[in-house]
Image (cartoon, rainbow, N blue to C red):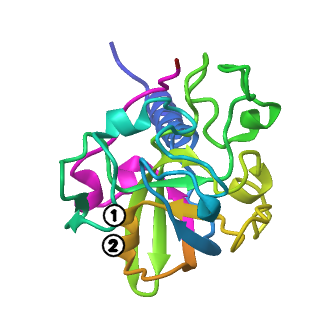
């Protein structure tokens, strides 16, 4: 059978357009950086006045976070990017941003705002839309990467800051931070105290090789 050139070119153009649109739909957006005060938190952190009495043995998506991580991610006793007492089962490069996609007490029901998440069409049927997503974080000359594993600081419904045009978070607690990062990310960035960092979403395929990819978290929701 002879394929007419015009049909061949039309087919190739259609295929190229399909590939392009697939990349746009399935990729996380590389938006503008947002700058915010950044604070330290960790798996297994006890509740006290410094964290508004919120314990971190559980996360927004995992009621057994500490167990699944492998233990307490102690920020004081470190061996490289890991706690000295064990090798983490999940990525030690993790963070929290102040938005969660589910209606509290009604999981797995999504909030109405969740439909506006740029990649919301990729995951559905009660699966998490945000857990394990990647961000790039910059501080000075340092650039590091981490996976989304909890919601906070201070808020759980700040859509306009996380995904919208607001440059500042709603959080009014303490130093009004808009990003919590793990001890590994804290060390990677060279932070010694709370400071302003810049962050943006990146697609996993755009995350370069580095210590943040030695252990990649792939777990789904774990609720009792």
Decide whether residue 209 is among the magenta residues.
yes
**Foreground pick, 49 / 12:** 49
The residue tagged 2 is 188
Residue 146 at x, y percent in the picture: 41, 56
Q: Position of residue 10 (x, y in %)?
A: 52, 33
Secondary structure under the numbered disc 2 in the rendered image: helix
**Position of 208 relative to 197 (above/below):** above
Where residue 172 sits, quadrant-wise, is bottom right
Q: Position of residue 11 (x, y in %)?
A: 48, 29
Left or right, 200 with reference to 4: right
- Mark 1 Cα-neighbour bin, 10 Å: few <14, some 14–19, many ≥20: many
In the image, which disc is placed on residue 50? none
Predominant secondary structure in magenta? loop
- Secondary element at tag 1: helix
The residue sitting at the top extreme is 1
Q: State left or right for residue 97 relative to residue 15.
A: right
Magenta stretch bounds: 199-223
Residue at left offset 76%, top offset 69%:
168
Q: Where, quadrant-wise, is the N terminus in this rendering?
A: top left
Which of 112 and 12 lies nearest the eye of the viewer? 112
Pointer 2 local density, CA inside 10 Å: few below 14, some 14–19, many at least 20: many
Furthest residue to the front? 48
Give the Cα distance between marks 1 and 2.
6 Å
* Residue named by callout 1: 184
């Amino acid at each position: 059978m002879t394929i007419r050139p015009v049909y061949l070119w039309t087919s190739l153009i259609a295929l190229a357009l399909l590939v392009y649109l697939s990349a746009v739909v399935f990729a996380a957006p590389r938006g503008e950086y947002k700058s915010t005060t950044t604070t330290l938190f960790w798996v297994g952190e006890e509740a006290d006045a410094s964290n508004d009495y919120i314990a971190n043995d559980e996360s927004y998506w995992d009621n057994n976070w500490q167990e699944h991580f492998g233990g307490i991610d102690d920020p004081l006793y470190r061996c490289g990017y890991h706690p000295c007492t064990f090798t983490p089962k999940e990525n030690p490069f993790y963070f929290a941003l102040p938005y969660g996609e589910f209606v509290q007490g009604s999981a797995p029901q999504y909030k109405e705002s969740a439909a506006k998440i740029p990649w919301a069409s990729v995951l559905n049927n009660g699966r998490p839309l945000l857990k394990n997503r990647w961000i790039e974080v910059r501080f000075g000359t340092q650039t590091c990467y981490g996976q989304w594993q909890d919601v906070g600081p201070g808020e759980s419904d700040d859509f306009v800051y996380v995904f919208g045009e607001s440059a500042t978070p709603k959080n009014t607690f303490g130093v009004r931070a808009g990003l919590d990062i793990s001890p590994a990310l804290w060390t990677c960035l060279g932070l010694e105290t709370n400071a302003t960092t810049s962050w943006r979403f990146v697609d996993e395929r755009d995350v370069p090789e580095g210590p943040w990819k030695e252990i990649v978290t792939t777990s789904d929701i774990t609720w009792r």
